Image: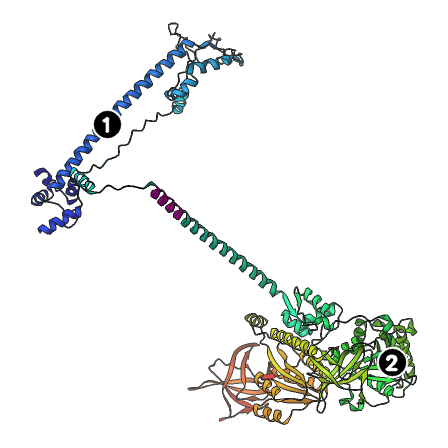
Amino acid sequence: MADTVAKKIKVKDVAKELNISHNDVIAFLTKKGYTSVKTLMSTVDDEMMRDINAHFKKEKDSAERHQRKIAELKETRKRTTDSKVKEEEEEKKTKRETTIKQIEKIGEPEIVVETPPPTEPVEQPPVVEEPVIVKSVEIPTPQETITTKEEESITSPLEAVRAGRGTQMRGLTVKGKIELAKPKKADKKTDKGAVVAPVVSDADESRKKKKKKKKIPEKGVGIKELLVEPDEEVSKKKKKKGKLRPYDIDEEEVQEAIKRTISEIEGGESLISTRAAYRKKKKKEREEQQALIEEAKALEATKLRVTEFVTVGEIANLMKVSPAEVIAKCISLGMMVSINQRLDKDTITLLADEFGKQVEFESEFTVDVLEDTPDDPSTLVPRPPVVTIMGHVDHGKTSMLDYIRNTNVVAGEAGGITQHIGAYEVTLPSGKHITFLDTPGHEAFTAMRARGAQLTDIVVLVVAAEDNVMPQTIEAINHAKAANVPIIIAINKIDKPEANPDRIRQQLSEKGVLVEEWGGKYQSVEVSAKTGKNIDLLLEKILLEAEILDLKANPNRPARGAVVEAQVDRGKGIVATVLVQKGTLRVGDAFIAGVWSGKVKAMFDERGNRVEAAPPSTPVQILGFDGVPTAGDQLIVVENERIAREISLRRQQLKREQDFRQVRFITLDDISQQIQAGVQVKELSIVVKGDVDGSVEALSDALMKLSTNEVKVNVIHKGVGAISESDVVLAAASKAIIVGFHVRPNLNARRLAEAEKVDIRLYSIIYDAINEIKKALEGLLTPTISEEVVATVEVRDTFKVPKVGIVAGCFVVDGKIARNNKVRLIRDGVTVYEGTLASLRRFKDDVKEVEKGFECGIGLENFNDIKVGDIIEAYKMVETKRKLN
């Protein structure tokens, strides 16, 4: 015990020896009052050891018994394994000896290997070599010999040798001889079983050694340590078992319980697996759904949802391109359009395709009701031709129509220019009828002319003989050609002395219009609207052209027509000029025109006379619209008012949706484009109100054309009728100005405008409106800042003044220098200083300015390096107003 203490036994060693936990030992020692013992690495002295042995005596005895049993078990296992190993080795040895003896009894054929003579001549005399006899004896390895009894019964080594003997007995053919380096003669006394081999070099021996496989030692059997229960614990368990009462086991109940348990386990597993599969399936479905939604969104971005007959401006806004691009594309496709012109279905589809978009037309409610049905040829009767008079402004279109109608329309037009489209019916002396459409010639009325060309059968192109073929004349030709309408040339004003009809014919031929006199297909007449010369000849040619066209229509069917013009009359309300194209329009008919429905309350001709029925090719003014229709809308008569109202409501809803889609808020992309362009776009918002729809459209179109990269005209609202309070409220909210064309504000609107400080501008001539808005836009343009030199001063002497610095004695060579002018000091053509004047004196007095030819004293701000001969240049910055191109 003294030895163990001397070695400083630790708590962990004591615990291991007693086969108990070190925590129990520490707890016991702490209880006894040994405070030095805290961890399993703490040392234990003699006194502590005595206490531990006394307290844990039982544990020590049981641990010793346990160790003895384990030692005995290990000893017995070792003895048994050693005896088994010895037996196996002896068995292997005997088997190896028996196989060797069997092989020796069989014997092997001798293999003679002759070496060929050397091919190259050798200096030394040739040595006669004896053939080397090699008797090969195959000694099987221990691994081959150790086989199971079953394998031995199937094939023995002897049989294997006999099987292979057949191939070896044939012998070998000698192909050549190998020269061996100094072969030793085989000893005659060697045994038959010995192997005579040639001398092998050191390199070969080392190679063979490398090839030898290492012997794998056999693995020993592992011994598991068995824990033997102490005798006391075993006896306790036996006592407990003895107390248990015997219990009869029912086999059926056991089987049922087993089945129930198995089914519960399987059911639980299947339930878990089905839940997981369901979740996986749902997740996959969600992902597929999301992918479809994303794909639909991408497709939706390229789709345009429009109703038929949207304007160029609206479709440009929907496609997020400028209207100028759309107009340019239309012109390249051979269509002359304006920003407010309505486009048909085919044109919209074609344009969208050009810009890489898809069009989806909103299907109208009960569209089949409005579908046009072709007429039976037997029901068709001749109808009067519809003739549109077109030409450049002030070429005498309305004057010529006046002569035909024997009235004075020009006197009623402001400024003597036509600003409304007029539809008139003329009865000739022969009793035949011709319907005339008079279109404005001013450039602002492009849309009106285009509409007139689409409604017409024949175009009369009026050109003044004393003038030239003007831009609007060319435009009218293009409109007529686009509508595929025959043209009759009326060369007007031939009564004037400076008239030159041949020059007009030549200019027309250059534009692709060759008259009949020059071998072309277009008829031409030289007329004078003032004297009435050849007007009857013009009417004859119109009737001749109409006969060739063979114009017919069915009067006995529901009417269909086109709205030529619309306006709000103070006494009558909404009045629209309609040209009936098919059927007969009667008072009391329910109709739909654009987004508005109505019922014909009354009809008037162009002179204000009441009309009960309007046959085909008759222009009439209609009362009974719910709202102001747009010029160009198709008027269709339906069965009753209910159907008309339903269609109207549906169309209004679609219009509202489309207007909502038109609203574009400024985005970061727009701002970045402006920054890249280096221009901050300024907007002039305008509310346009007019007496008729066509004029409002034309004015809006003309104003929007004034827009440039820097300033933009934004028509936020346009409408027909007097300027109302709602227009003023809208203008006040949008900081817009109101432009009234042939209309005036009512009293309440005027008062509200004064209170809200809204500017209302009223015009009767379109030129004035355009020019004033142009001036307003020029005011929005950033002025050009330029530099203007006001004086040139020469330095003739310099003076040093205490506390001030250098003062230059100068002479004003040119101009007039002022105290507040900016100056620059120039020396030998190089600017040395640029700044302001510190002082300007004449003799001893401070002065505001010094004129040419006078001397003065000049001090420069924070600069003293002034020398004789320097030039002082005085200048000022001037802001110049810019003009719109």
Coloring basis for residues: rainbow
In the image, is residue 223 part of the stretch drawn in magenta?
Answer: no
Quadrant where the C terminus is found in the figure: bottom right
Which residue is nearer to you in this view: 225 or 414? 225
x, y percentage for residue 793?
56, 85
Which residue is nearer to you in this view: 598 or 452? 598
Magenta residues (range) = 252-265
Q: In this rendering, would 54 be left or right of 636?
A: left
Q: Quadrant of residue 152?
A: top left
Nearer mark to the viewer, of 2 and 1: 1
Res 2 seen here: yes
Q: CA distance from mark 2 to mark 1?
A: 138 Å
Disc 2 element: strand
Res 789 seen here: no
Disc 1 element: helix
x, y percentage for residue 551?
86, 74
Using the image, determine if residue 422 lies above or below residue 336: below
Instruction: Estimate how packed mark 1 is, as few (under 14), some (14 to 19) or many (20 or more) residues with alpha carbons within 10 Å.
Output: some
Amino acid type indicated by mark 1: Lys
Q: Which mark is residue 378?
A: none
- The residue that disc 1 covers is 78
Q: Quadrant of residue 231?
A: top left
- The residue that disc 2 covers is 491
Which residue is nearer to you in this view: 632 or 266? 266
Using the image, determine if residue 200 lies above or below residue 879: above
Q: Earlier in the sequence, mark 2 or mark 1?
A: 1
Q: Quadrant of residue 777?
A: bottom right
Q: Residue at x 29, y 20 (%)?
A: 87
